[in-house]
């Protein structure tokens, strides 16, 4: 029961979850059990994601944004601390720094990959810098060798927003082992879903303890531990939030995780088909170019992002997007550069010209539909629609 775009001819979204009867059964089983929240499923899901990714500890929370916030608290970000972030990401990455009263410092991205450029990161480091928040945009891991060496030289923490990159690898190492803390989201458009959900992975037991406390009001024991040990007292050691995830959501996540390797394979097959379809041919120049992929990575392809060669077209990105929509193809744009969002301009005085590579990329970027349940016929519909529209408006 995974066929996804419901009927031929129906709109193809840019991303979509897959649920199996086993997933639904796993959720129902937990609904019939004693623990709806903070029970055995949460721990099982944490261990499953940690062991899949090669990390020692997992801390599951109610969404990826909460996981980011929890990571910023765990590494001690506070008033006025600077954290270096890329502008090409979802707003939640930078917002997590602000939640802790820190200051996001936007460092530009590399033109080919749109990943954080280590040279720009180095230039952005000041005596107030506490951490680098790398974003594995589209599902491609950043240059962690370069980022780690900068972090070590300047005594900074390295955190990975890997909400796009569950299952990706860098130089043969899984995402989850490349930073001090790695964050995932289980929103329905991501690789696996819990409805809403997120997780932090770390190898550091002290960071894991601190994150577990932050997830539950700053209290170091949970209701289940107190029930099992027969005590009623608890101590609140620091200020925390209620960022818990339910047991039935974690049952869904664990069930989904078992299909992740096959889903990653399918996403890679679709991405390679797009690469091949849009490559230049003799007598016909390419009218868009996919993002560059480093030979050092195994890409998880949360998104398939390509950049339009606007000078070869008589139409802009909004025009291409609208033409695709008319044909039932749900293209999307990821992302408007965060430093140009009104909130950041107003609050931190960020402005145009600060990240020229990201700003030049933005008008050209288009995310094509990519999800593991896409049928070959869906993929071919997207290819044909893109080719037709670009040929029709070629200059
Ligand atoms: C999805 C996403 C988030 C936030 O995750 P939620 O679970 O929606 O809160 C953060 N960063 C990036 C890069 C994301 O794609």
Image (cartoon, rainbow, N blue to C red):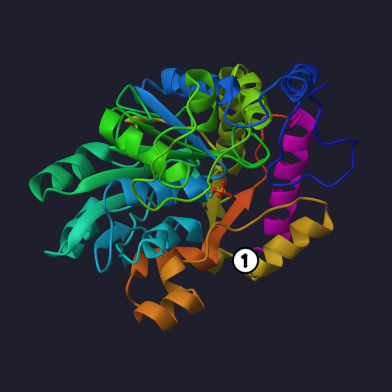
- Report x, y in % for residue 380: 74, 36
Does label 1 point to a residue whose CB lies under 8 Å from ligand 1? Answer: no
Q: Quadrant of residue 180?
A: top left
Binning the other alpha carbons within 10 Å of mark 1 as few (below 14), some (14 to 19) or many (20 upward) gives some
| Depth check, front residue: 268 or 257 | 257
Q: Is residue 384 magenta?
A: yes
Work out which quarter of the rendered image holds the N terminus and state it.
top right
The residue depicted at 17 percent of the width and 61 percent of the height is: 125
Q: Quadrant of residue 148?
A: top left
Question: Magenta region's main secondary structure?
Answer: helix
- Report x, y in % for residue 96: 42, 57
Residue 293 visible? The answer is no
The residue depicted at 48 percent of the width and 42 percent of the height is: 216
Q: From what the image shows, is residue 4 above or below residue 289?
A: above
Seen in the image, is 349 located left or right of residue 310? left
Residue 124 visible? The answer is yes
Label 1 sits on residue? 317
| Depth check, front residue: 344 or 138 | 344
The residue depicted at 43 percent of the width and 17 percent of the height is: 51
- Report x, y in % for residue 101: 34, 67
Span highlighted in magenta in the image = 374-395
Seen in the image, is 154 located left or right of residue 384? left
Q: Is residue 263 magenta?
A: no
The residue depicted at 59 percent of the width and 40 percent of the height is: 197
Seen in the image, is 83 located left or right of residue 155? right
Work out which quarter of the rendered image holds the C terminus and state it.
bottom right
- Report x, y in % for residue 65: 50, 51
Looking at the rendered structure, the secondary structure element under dot 1 is: helix
């Amino acid at each position: 029961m995974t066929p996804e775009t419901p009927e031929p001819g129906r709109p193809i979204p840019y991303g979509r979850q897959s649920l199996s009867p086993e997933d639904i059964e796993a959720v129902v089983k937990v609904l019939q059990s004693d623990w709806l929240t903070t029970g055995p499923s949460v721990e099982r899901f944490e261990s499953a994601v940690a062991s899949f990714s090669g990390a020692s500890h997992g801390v599951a929370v109610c969404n990826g944004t909460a996981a980011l916030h929890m990571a910023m608290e765990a590494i001690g970000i506070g008033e006025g601390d600077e954290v270096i972030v890329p502008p090409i990401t979802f707003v939640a990455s930078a917002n997590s720094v602000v939640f802790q009263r820190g200051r996001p410092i936007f460092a530009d991205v590399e033109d080919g990959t749109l990943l954080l450029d280590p040279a720009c990161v180095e230039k952005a480091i000041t005596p107030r810098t506490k951490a680098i928040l790398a974003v594995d945009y589209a599902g491609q891991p950043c240059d962690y060798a370069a980022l780690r060496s900068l972090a070590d030289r300047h005594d900074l923490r390295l955190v990975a927003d890997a909400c796009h990159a569950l299952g990706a690898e860098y130089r043969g190492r899984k995402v989850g082992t490349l930073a001090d803390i790695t964050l995932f989201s289980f929103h329905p458009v991501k690789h696996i879903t819990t409805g809403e959900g997120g997780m932090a992975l770390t190898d550091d037991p002290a960071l894991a303890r601190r994150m577990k406390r932050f997830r539950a009001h700053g209290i170091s024991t949970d209701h289940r531990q107190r029930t099992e040990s027969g005590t009623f007292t608890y101590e609140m050691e620091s200020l925390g939030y209620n960022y818990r995830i339910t047991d039935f959501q974690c049952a869904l996540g664990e069930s989904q995780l078992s299909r992740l390797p096959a889903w990653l394979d399918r996403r890679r097959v679709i991405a390679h088909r797009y690469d091949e379809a849009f490559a230049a041919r003799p007598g016909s120049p390419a009218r868009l170019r996919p993002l560059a992929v480093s030979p050092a990575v195994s890409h998880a392809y949360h998104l398939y992002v390509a950049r339009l060669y606007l000078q070869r077209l008589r139409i802009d990105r909004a025009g291409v997007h609208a033409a695709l929509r008319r044909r039932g193809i749900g293209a999307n744009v990821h992302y408007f550069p965060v430093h140009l969002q009104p909130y950041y301009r107003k609050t931190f005085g960020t402005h145009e010209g600060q990240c020229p590579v990201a700003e030049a990329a933005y008008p050209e970027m288009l995310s094509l539909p990519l999800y593991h349940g896409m049928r070959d016929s869906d993929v071919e519909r997207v290819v044909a629609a893109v080719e037709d529209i670009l040929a029709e408006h070629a200059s």
